[in-house]
Image: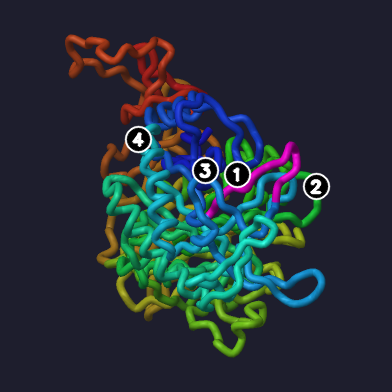
Amino acid sequence: MLNRYHMTGIQFYDWQWQHHILFPQDSTHWKDIGLRNVYKSSIENYINQLHGVGSKCMFYDLIYGVTGNMNGNTPETPDNLDKDGVSSDWGWIDLHEKKGGGYDLHQYQYPLGSWPSIYVMNPGNQNWVNYLAGSINKVYQNFGFDGYHIDQLGHQRDAYYVNLKSKKVNGKKVYTDGDRRNTNDFEGYFANFINRMKADNHNKYLVMNAASSFGGPNIVGTKNVEFGYNEMWGGDDYYWNYRKIIQDNRRNNGKNTFNTVFAAYLHCRNGRPGELRLSSALMGEATIFALGGSRIELSGDHMLFTEYFPDDTRPMSSKLQKSIIHYYDFLTAYENYLRDNNAETTVSMTMDGKQVAAWDLSNPDPSLNEHPEKQTIGPKPYMVNTYSTKKGDVTTIQLLNYSNVSRDNFNIRDLSETMPLPNVLNNKKIVLDDAQPVARIWVASPDRLGGAPQELDFTQSSGKVAFTLPSLEYWTMVVVEHGQKSVDNSSRIKNYVLSGESFSLAQQNSLVAGEVYLSFPASLVSATTNVMPLKMVTEGIKNLTNVCGNSSDDYYTLSGIKLQKPSKGVYIHDGKTIVVK
């Protein structure tokens, strides 16, 4: 399944025994922090299988967690925890309100209900950093992981204490004094930790969660993480903020090609049962992908509903499962148009004579920092909106159908589950202001024709370009290529759909989503070529020897990637080219 969604980076979540000692040395199995059974052989098999299809495997762990103890089925929760060579003196020590009034100084503890608590450490304490670095090195020595996904808890508290003084009371450590510091320091400590991890294992990949953007500029500014990773919570979850974070991450990293992945859990913990809402999921996909971002949202056979990735209590409908395949196909096929060094721009466009809203690229009003829901930047409600980029002679216009979406629904997680189904717009007359000569216009949408491109007829006069938009459901991409317009049809796009043992020329609007098709400029084929039969070609293969022990049950893509189970498409199997329908 992961291969079908083009997933080439996999996070192993909560695989570890404890946060500070990730696996018990010389053990074949253990309980994870959620008290589930984990087998070392299973982890190794997953890694090997994923490496076999070209995927990278990242293990997950907190930057500052020590797993607490259990007393039978009950977690132990002392104020301070010393265990396994870890001292609470290295921890995140802060003032906590006492039940009877007043405050005492002890370690910050993150409770997990019936599971062991997490005792949080000071990420700037070098004793702790050295201890965790040793645990990380042991992981690399014993498993074939390609890198480390570093997690944090966001901005939880304002203060921590160092230079601690303590005494024993009834055999327990009690902190009596220390020097107060601001937890904004943690943002710099995060960067230091990333750089340390890279120095220790320079050939391994790193990613770190900027939960609610805490530490985000420092994290991506190290230039030692592969992409930005932002977990979105309450005050973050606004359409305008997703675009802002993508652009901020690029600027802080120093590369306009730097990418961002969002963790935004659909309907997260809203207390409702049943299938995830189709319109919420697809409008969220459309918005994030159109803005040049990506999303972590699939875990095994389900979509993420909470930050605990194994939680599968909210299933996907069959329609949603099929639809997001088209969205991931689209994200992969058109990545160069979506996020490859494109510069933001703004276009002026009308649809059936009415102005189409352009995404407001202004900075947020700082006076509304405490009330992000009142910001009016970004898209306009109850309108079709454009988000546009330019690279060279190509302008790419993302049309997002918010024509029946209120500002209250301009969030990805849709906790209220009120995102309406879009009004599908067909055959709309578009007039685009463009003074440059236009050579070609084509459109593509994950909601139509399986994402296949469709070239459009257009006219241009006095700085106005007119064409008919075939369809807009959630999202349609319009690509305007500037230059000299061709006098013939040799540069037009032709689509061929698989039918039986051949590909047949498809007339406009005749492609069916989910079918296998080929798409390329008409100049590559004869004007009279309407059918292209599948043909076995073996002339270039001689003296084939099975040096890898491959089984006749194996399937390979035409690019040579081994698959566990093929979906629809053309594959190599048992020495033959076959079509899976």
Query: Which label is found at residue 323?
Result: 1
Q: Earlier in the sequence, mark 2 or mark 3?
A: 2
Q: Amino acid at mark 1?
A: Ser
* Earlier residue among tags 4 and 3: 4
For marks 2 and 4, give the CA distance.
43 Å
User: Dot 1 lies on which element?
Assistant: helix
Q: CA distance from mark 4 to mark 3?
A: 44 Å
Q: Report the span colored magenta.
A: 65-76
Mark pair 4, 1: CA separation: 41 Å
Tell me if I can see residue 554 in this picture.
yes
Q: Is residue 297 left or right of residue 205?
A: right
Residue, x 35% and y 28% (percent of image)? 561
Q: Residues within 10 Å of mark 2 (few under 14, many from 20)?
A: few
Look at label 3 and name its amino acid: Gly
Residue at 65% over, 57% down = 172
Q: Is residue 42 magenta?
A: no
**Do residues under tags 2 and 3 come within 8 Å of each other at their CB atoms?**
no
* Of marks 1 and 2, the one in the foreground: 2
Residue 189 position in % (x across, y down): 41, 66
Query: Between 214 and 532, which is closer to the camera in this rendering?
Result: 214
Dot in front, 3 or 1: 1
20 sits to left or right of 490: right
